[in-house]
């Protein structure tokens, strides 16, 4: 376990200015937004692929029921 004196010493060594804190916060927010957009993109793509798959299966069933596929 780290002593309170060591923690205080570490805090004194790692002081950040308000500008540095603001810059870090902005970068973190940008990365968070980027991750949200990536997740939204993946979700939309997954739904589009699912819809295309259903449409293809439907077309195959329609063609098969019309007798176009002969075995």
Image (tube, grey):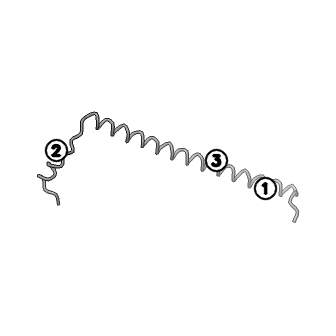
CB-based contact (under 8 Å), mark 1 and mark 3: no
Mark 2 / mark 1, whichever is N-terminal = 2
Name of the residue lying farthest toward the top: 19
Which of 55 and 34 lies nearest the eye of the viewer? 34
Q: Residue at x 81, y 53 (%)?
A: 62
Taking 34 as reference, is 62 left or right? right
Q: Residue at x 74, y 55 (%)?
A: 57
Residue 11 vertical position relative to residue 19 in the rendered view, above or below: below
Q: Residue at x 18, y 46 (%)?
A: 11
Mark 2 / mark 3, whichever is N-terminal = 2
Residue to which mark 3 is pinned: 48
Name of the residue lying farthest toward the bottom: 71
Decide: few, some or many residues near mark 3? Use Cα within 10 Å; few <14, some 14-19, many ≥20.
few
Q: Locate residue 42, reporting x and y percent.
A: 55, 48
Decide: few, some or many residues near mark 1? Use Cα within 10 Å; few <14, some 14-19, many ≥20.
some
Quarter of image, res 3: bottom left
Q: Which mark is residue 12?
A: 2
Which of 15 and 1 lies nearest the eye of the viewer? 15
């Amino acid at each position: 376990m780290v002593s309170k004196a060591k923690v205080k010493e570490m805090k004194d060594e790692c002081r950040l200015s308000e500008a540095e804190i603001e810059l870090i916060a902005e970068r973190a927010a940008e990365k968070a937004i980027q991750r949200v957009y990536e997740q939204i993109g993946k979700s939309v793509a997954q739904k589009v692929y699912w819809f295309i798959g259903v449409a293809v299966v439907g077309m195959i069933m329609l063609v098969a029921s019309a007798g176009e596929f002969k075995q």
